[in-house]
Amino acid sequence: MQQPDTREIMTLNRIVVGSVIVIFLVVIAIYLLVFSGKTGQYSDFEDYVFGTYIQIRISSKVNPSTVSKAIFNEMKRLEKKYDTYSEGSIIYQLNHADDWVEVDDETLALVDLALKYARQTEGAFDPALGRVIDLWGFSKFTQREAEGGNFTVPTLSEIRDALANSGYTKIAIDYVSKKIKTNGVWIDLGGMLKGYALKRGYQIAKEYDPKCHGFIQAGGQIMILGPKYNKANWVVGIRDPRGQPDENVGFVYLKEGSIATSGDYERFFIVDGVRYHHLIDPKNGLPASGAISATIICDDPVTADVFSTAAFVLGEKTWLFTRTAFPTYGAEVFLVTPKQKILKTDNFALYEQADR
Ligand code: ADP
Ligand code: MG
């Protein structure tokens, strides 16, 4: 047998070593592409607005920190402008005036929208419950709780008096001279402000980079900016209202739009073993008792925010109205009853399919 000469052996060695290096580099490249490349696409930011933490996860061509700062600034502007209790706010002015008050376009549009939602939900969402909410102490709740919170249950006659000076039908709008008159009620936009802030957040992100993706989370609501890695669904858990914060009663898969949950576990106090929470039934001025959580999926985040409060208030007894009316406004509902039964609108199941 002929012996291979040393030159041939060296060439063979070089080929083997070369191939090993190439394979090694390819493996590293694939690893970087699949793992670090993609997960590293997103930047996370957090700030505290509306008495809750706001998280932004975003991938954009424009510096993500710049985009996030602009979003947080806008949210803080809205918080200040529509704070029921600060004397400089337009809501404070409206609530403490005996006469017509001239307002800016944004406020006129927001109050007009609030009245429209009140009519659509047959008054279950009522933006003129400020006096009742104040009586229960649910305004500035986080702050009061941090200070040791001395919550008491109001008497029925106190509730009756507050209700007598509440209700959206008392609000008058003059669209020509851009004026609003509250006629004694207190406006409280707490049930739609976070949704509106998310809508503005989305608009700002898209102005900076129309192709940006990720999401903004504000308390119990999420606004999707774009699909995960620009192609996949975001998996969103629906929190178990009687479980730990990380326990879920369902999952949905979303590439766009918004999902909002209103629950009796968000803001509440307990007196003599009874839980009193912040979602008020405008019919009697008491915390609504027909549900323990309500989740809405809707393209529009303001509708999602408002209808989650409304679906909660309407509860199990009025479910037939909710399941018939809400989808006509593009809102799909997932309701958890006091006995923890789950009720869903017909098309909700579409969002529960992982391979949509
Ligand atoms: P959270 O603000 O805790 O996320 P929601 O979005 O459901 O919860 O809004 C609840 C807020 O809406 C309350 O804190 C209160 O300011 C206001 N609110 C309570 N009951 C009603 C109601 N029936 N209609 C309109 N707003 C309400
Ligand atoms: Mg809401």
Image: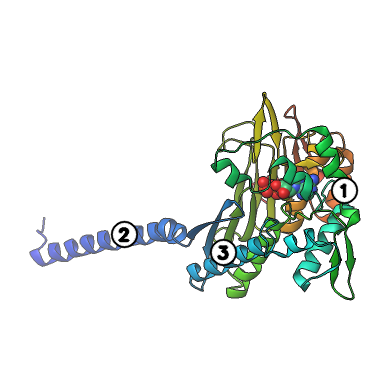
Residue pointed to by mark 1? 123
Image position, residue 29 (x, y; %): 37, 62
Is label 3 in contact with label 2 (beta carbons under 8 Å)?
A: no
Image position, residue 344 (x, y; %): 78, 40
User: Picture quarter containing residue 277?
Assistant: top right
Position above or below: 21 against 269: below
Question: Distance of mark 1 from mark 2, alpha carbons?
Answer: 67 Å
Q: Please tell me how many numbered marks the rendered image carries.
A: 3
Give the amino acid at mark 3.
Phe
Q: Residue furthest top?
A: 272
Residue pointed to by mark 3? 72
Residue at (89, 39) in percent of width and height: 320
Question: Distance of mark 1 from mark 3, alpha carbons?
Answer: 31 Å
Q: Is residue 57 left or right of residue 110?
A: left
Between disc 1 and disc 2, the foreground one is 1
Image position, residue 120 (x, y; %): 88, 53
Mark 3, secondary structure of its residue: helix
Position above or below: 281 against 194: above
User: Picture quarter containing residue 132?
Assistant: top right
Decide if residue 286 is in sight here: yes
Residue pointed to by mark 2? 23
The image's mark for residue 153 is none
Instruction: Specify the quadrant that holds the N terminus.
Output: bottom left
Residue at (78, 41) in percent of width and height: 280
Mark 1, secondary structure of its residue: loop
Task: Assess disc 1: are there few (<14), some (14-19) or many (≥20) residues with their C-alpha within 10 Å of its C-alpha.
Answer: many
- Dot 1 or dot 2: first in sequence order is 2
Give the amino acid at mark 1.
Gly
Question: Distance of mark 3 from mark 2, alpha carbons?
Answer: 46 Å
